[in-house]
Amino acid sequence: MNKETKQKDIESNDILICAKPLELTDGLHEGKITYFVSSNRSEYDYMEVGIITDDNNNEEIELHASFPRYLSMGSSLGKFLKKAGFNIRSGEPTNLSDVADTIRNKKVTFQTTTEETDKGTFHNIIVSTIQFI
């Protein structure tokens, strides 16, 4: 590896397999929460929830939704936690590890929209539509 340019030579066994396109109709879906974690992959801290559901071909896929890591009665995270059954009160702490343990494997409904960009096609969960069932 060249340290100056951080390039790596391609080896003869370096193979990529082209993934088939993800097909997911916009609208209402049902799924199950797989994880709830704190993330800072960007300059902002946020919470991320993973939800598995079936695509148009009945194959399991995992989608992700993000919330700013800001908790108040009216924030998107606060509204999500209230829907999950947590009693959010101003000035009181909420243990996010307890939240993750409680909501993992819970069934939910949610709506998606499709966004076409120069980076690809993305199926986005509309965060405000996540409902626990």
Image (cartoon, rainbow, N blue to C red):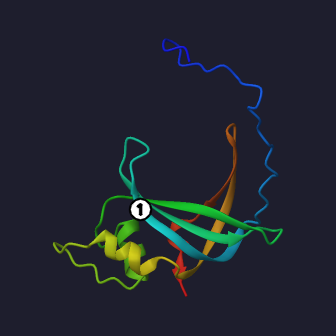
Which image quarter is the C terminus in?
bottom right
The correct choice, above or below, for 21 with respect to 36 in the image is: above
Which image quarter is the N terminus in?
top right
Residue pictured at 77% horizontal, 57% vertical: 22
Residue pictured at 37% horizontal, 46% vertical: 44
The image quadrant that residue 52 belongs to is bottom right
Q: In this view of the protein, which residue sits in the foreground, 92 or 35?
A: 35
**Dot 1: within a 10 Å radius of its alpha carbon, few (fewer than 14), some, or many (20 or more) residues?**
some
Residue at numbered disc 1: 37
The correct choice, above or below, for 126 with respect to 109 in the image is: above
The correct choice, above or below, for 14 with respect to 29 in the image is: above
The image quadrant that residue 56 belongs to is bottom right
Residue pictured at 30% horizontal, 73% vertical: 73
Q: For numbered disc 1, what is the local secondary structure?
A: strand
The image quadrant that residue 88 belongs to is bottom left
Q: In this view of the protein, which residue sits in the foreground, 2 or 89?
A: 2
Residue 129, how many percent across, how many down? 55, 73
Residue pictured at 27% horizontal, 72% vertical: 95
Residue 55, how many percent across, how many down? 76, 67
Please state if 58 lies on the left or on the right of 121 as rendered: right
Give the mark count: 1
Residue type at mark 1 is Val
Q: In this view of the protein, which residue sits in the foreground, 59 or 55?
A: 59
Residue 132, how many percent across, how many down? 52, 83
